[in-house]
Image: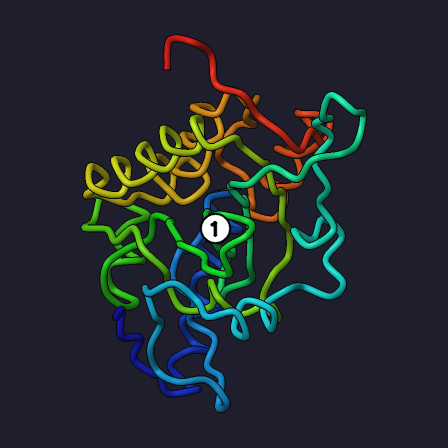
Amino acid sequence: MANVKRKKPSLQCMLGMCLLTVSTGLGIGSSNAQQLVERTDHPDSVSRKPLSGSDLAALAPASAASSATDAKPVRKSRSGESVRGPYYVDFRARTAASYGHAFVWFGKTNEKQVEVAGLHPSGDELPYMLGHLTWVPSETGASYGDLDAEYLTASYRVYLNEEDAKKVFAYIRHLQETSPLWNAETTNCTFFIGEIASYMGLKVPFHLQLPETYVNQLKEMNGGRQTARLTSDR
């Protein structure tokens, strides 16, 4: 479990104003990977365990322009009928107190479970602020807000066959194990999901963009394609 401490409203407001000033002055387009928005109807923790069927159904975005629930694979069977890929990686963006956050959901379509991977600072406000000047320790699992549909701003789901999914999921877990540091301008959340997209053979945008812009541009650059096949050398 990744505990998320509540912050006093006054401290959050002051921090948000400071971060907005910094980002405007420096022209930084990278993302804050920690959700700092306080909700009175949400527990103070984020589960790293797979979601239950009812939880996953509740998380389905209702109005996001690129909602994962609207994605339909284009792969055809021999009979010409559409076939839903059994596995997927969903590139997602959500709001936060500053820039927002980019991360991925990944799993199997016929199993109502989801895993979350994303790069974000380990700790509270101080590591995040220091991360604009240097590298700070990171975490790579779910962060506060990654499981809340109301924070979702963009989603691009790509389907995989079983053989490719095993390799891609192993690569995601490898990135989680070997990404010890976070920095707002270099090894940030958009860079992290870009590594996954690149491994899948997708074209990737420059990573110094707002998470919502990055995910939407990722989809646009790949023509909205909804299936991916790895090359034979993977």
SS at mark 1 in the image:
strand
Q: Residue at the location (47% across, 12% down)?
A: 231
Q: Say which of 70 and 16 sits in front.
A: 70
Left or right of 102: which side holds 79? Answer: right
Q: Residue at the location (76% across, 63% down)?
A: 63
Q: Say which of 181 and 112 sits in front.
A: 112
- Counting from the top left corner in percent of width and height, residue 129 is at 31, 58
Q: From where the camera sits, is residue 26 visible? A: yes
- Counting from the top left corner in percent of width and height, residue 224 is at 72, 32
- Counting from the top left corner in percent of width and height, residue 228 is at 57, 25
Residue 86 drawn above or below residue 37? above
* Extreme residue in the top direction: 233
Please identify the quadrant where the C terminus is shown: top left
Left or right of 137: which side holds 107? Answer: right
Q: Say which of 180 and 28 sits in front.
A: 180
What amino acid type is highlighted by mark number 1? Trp
